[in-house]
Structures are given as C-alpha cells and as structure tokens.
Amino acid sequence: MKFLVTGVAGFIGYHIAQALLARGQTVAGVDNVNSYYDVRLKRARVARLNAERLFSFHEIDIADHAALREASLDAEVIIHLAAQAGVRYSIDNPFAYAASNLTGHLSILEAARHAPRLTHLVYASSSSVYGAGSSLPYSESARADRPQSLYAATKRADEMMSVAYAHLYGLRQTGLRFFTVYGPWGRPDMAYFSFAEAMMAGRPITLYEGGRLKRDFTFIDDIVDGVLGVVDCPPAHEGAHRLYNIGNNRAETVFDLVAILEAELDRRAVIIDTPRPPADPVETCADLEALTTLTGFVPKVTLNQGVPRFVAWYRDWYAQRGLTG
C-alpha cells in the first residue's frame, strides 16, 4: 500500500513514517522544513528516512496545491500531520496558522478528492479544540466551540472542513485529537524539551502557577500504535467522518514532569513562577473509550518510563554535536 505522510520531517510524522516503513509499506513524505524550530533536527529525521528503500521525500509546502496534488496522486492512504504548531506562537504569528492550518488543510482535502486510489484520509487535530467549558476527561461528544487560542480555532475549522468534504465527495476520513505528545526526536518548543535544554545550560525555566497545570502526557510510541490502529480500521462506507481522542488518559502536573527531568538529568531546575497565560488550559485529559473500542488502543508508557527514554536520546543527540555540558 502507498502512503503519503505530510509533516514527515516533524516529530510525529517522522515516527509514523518509520513505523510504516518497518511494515514494508511505501511512503512518500512531504514537508517544507520550515524554521519554526531547529532545522538540523528536521533534516536529521529526513536523512534517516531517506536511507530506507521504500521512502521518497518531497520538500514542498502543503499550501502549494499544485505540487501537493502531484505528490499525492498515487496515494492510497494519506496521513496528514503537517501544521503550524504551538498555542502561544499563534498569538504573535497568526498568518502562519492561516497559511498552514487552514489553506494547507484545504489543499490536502482537494488533493485527496482527486487521488483516484485513495481509500482513507487520516488527519491530525488537537486536544486544544475543547477550549473552555468542557468537563474532564474530554470526550469526543464534548462541546468544541469555545477555542482559547487561534491555533485551537484553526484545528476546529479543519475538522469542519473535513466534515463538509466527507459529505460532498464521499471522502473516508478520520481525525485524531492529539494530546500532549513527547519522546525521543521530539519538538524543542515543547515544555519537556525546552526544560531539559534550559536545565542543562543552567538557565531558569518558567512554570505557570507553580507547575500545578496538568497535561495528558502521551509517549510517542503509544501515539504511533494509536495512529496505525486507525489506519488498520478505516471507515466502512463512503462519506464517513470520525473523530477520536488519542492520549494517555492520565493528567499529570508539569511539576511532576520537572521532578523526573531533574532526576534523569542530575540537574536542579531554577524555577520562575508566573501566572497562567489565557491560551493555556488548567488541565487536559483524554477519554479514550471510543478509540479503544475501535482499535483496542491502550497506552502503555507512563511519564516515569517515557521521560528517561527521552533524556537518553537527548544526551546522545546533543553530545554528538557538542551542544550540552
């Protein structure tokens, strides 16, 4: 089977592509390799994938519809993970989100409906869509009409566009609302990664409300299992559009995350305590009943197990480049 994976130079896209290649699938990867975070990390991910015989890479922007459509013509399954990420970044750079998350998602939908062999479009949404007013743990039936950030609003808009395209063109689609994903080869803008960098450099880290905010931290291996489970269970009929949470079903404090990092890095964190920004929720937690019923998905890796695996990779990655002490 031929897969198209967008955002393949990114954290989740890289791991998904690796897993598909390990299954013997043919994977075409798309990414514009932008400079939102360290391009060296993105290039290194792509280099590892390029070593695989069944992988091909297309350095294009998903908002470039003509180039994307050409790259996706042979795809049987599209896994769309490319997006402009980051909640707080959207406050200062709103138009980046319009181009990547709105125009880019529309470009994917148009490419999908013109791909003659396509059977399933799987795309990334976000737990951020739940916004204000939803009770915990978040279930897919909870309201998602009060976004607290532009990023969240674009992700909810993507879901609505997908519903329309499923209705109009019979596209079989599955949207996945990702909760906080972490692990080796992760994103430097995420808290666990930026905390590790700061602690190793002796710089302070910023915690909101003393680190009492809670997140549903989900290890990358569990995310890969969940995404592949959805790929293996496509919608049964044309025009079906489904939404699933994919997380760990366990809310843990950011303070606990820092404590584990301190133990693994053997460094004491210097903490600056500040109020919570309005775009940041107090707590997130995924109700996984729907995804478990569909695929048998059960997350396996706890925060105490996953953070040491990230730190081991982190030490190796930066030691190779002489960037940490």
Image: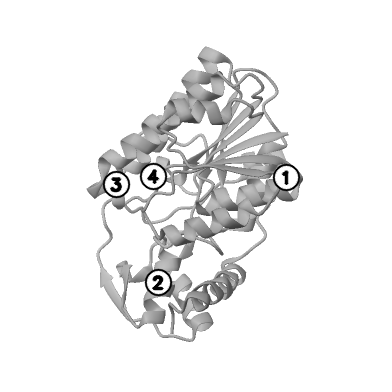
Say if 286 sits above or below 220 in the image.
Answer: above
N-term-proximal mark, 2 vs 1: 2
Say if 23 sits above or below 231 in the image.
Answer: below
Q: In the rendered structure, which amino acid carries the disc numbered 3?
A: Ser
Q: In the rendered structure, which amino acid carries the disc numbered 1?
A: Gly
Total number of numbered labels? 4
Name the image quarter holding residue 210.
bottom left
Q: Residues within 10 Å of mark 4 (few under 14, many from 20)?
A: many
Res 16 seen here: yes
Q: Residues within 10 Å of mark 2 (few under 14, many from 20)?
A: many
Q: In the rendered structure, which amino acid carries the disc numbered 4?
A: Gln
N-term-proximal mark, 3 vs 4: 4
N-term-proximal mark, 3 vs 2: 3
Residue contact between numbered discs 3 and 4, judged by CB atoms under 8 Å? yes
Residue at x 66%, y 25% (from the top left corner): 119
Q: Secondary structure at mark 4?
A: loop
Residue beneath label 4, please?
A: 84
Q: Secondary structure at mark 2?
A: helix
Q: Locate the C terminus by quadrant.
A: bottom left
Residue contact between numbered discs 3 and 1, judged by CB atoms under 8 Å? no
Residue beneath label 2, please?
A: 195
Q: Position of residue 212 (x, y in %)?
A: 38, 67
Res 216 seen here: no
Distance Cα–Cα, label 4 vs label 2: 21 Å
Q: How is the image coloured?
A: one colour
Residue beneath label 3, please?
A: 90
Residue beneath label 1, please?
A: 296
Q: Position of residue 309 (x, y in %)?
A: 60, 71
